[in-house]
């Protein structure tokens, strides 16, 4: 299969202990929509990251994520997963 570019908004939440953790991811049709969705998610969660990543889903090989925007609490050590397979992003995910 050919390379596909994914645009994703990734929620950052807090555990009961107050630690920041990566939560749900929502796929978007464009970088602008990923940024808009991340902004909305951050209004409900600790924060959110919008990113894009290209790769071949059949091979499970993806490029490094390109961060489009960060909102709220998103420490630099919280980055998108290297593999989109670990995200379980629903194809029709919507906010």
Image (spheres, rainbow, N blue to C red):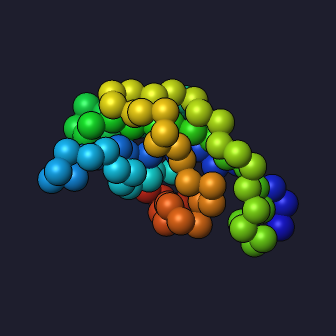
Up/down of 93 relative to 13, above or below: below
Direction from residue 79 to residue 1 in the image, left or right: right
Residue 22 seen from this side: yes
Residue 13, position in %: x, y?
A: 28, 46
Up/down of 45 relative to 70, above or below: below
Looking at the image, which residue is at 34% across and 50% down? 21
Q: To which quarter of the image does residue 20 belong?
A: top left
Looking at the image, which residue is at 20% across and 45% down? 18
Residue 39 seen from this side: no
Residue 76, position in %: x, y?
A: 49, 33
Looking at the image, which residue is at 70% across and 45% down? 64
In this view, the residue in front, 51 or 36, is: 51
* Label total for image: 0
In this view, the residue in front, 9 or 76, is: 76
Direction from residue 70 to residue 85 in the image, left or right: right
In this view, the residue in front, 85 or 14, is: 14
Pick out the residue farthest to the bottom. 58
Looking at the image, which residue is at 33% across and 28% down? 72
Residue 48, position in %: x, y?
A: 39, 37
Residue 89, position in %: x, y?
A: 50, 60
Q: To which quarter of the image does residue 1 belong?
A: bottom right
């Amino acid at each position: 299969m050919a390379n596909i570019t994914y645009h994703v908004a990734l929620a950052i939440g807090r555990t009961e202990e107050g630690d920041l953790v990566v939560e749900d991811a929502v796929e978007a049709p464009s970088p602008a929509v990923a940024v808009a969705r991340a902004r909305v998610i951050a209004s409900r969660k600790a924060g959110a990251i919008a990113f894009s990543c290209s790769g071949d889903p059949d091979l499970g090989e993806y490029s490094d994520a390109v961060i489009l925007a960060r909102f709220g609490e998103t420490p630099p050590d919280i980055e998108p997963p290297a593999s989109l397979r670990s995200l379980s992003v629903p194809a029709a995910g919507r906010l």
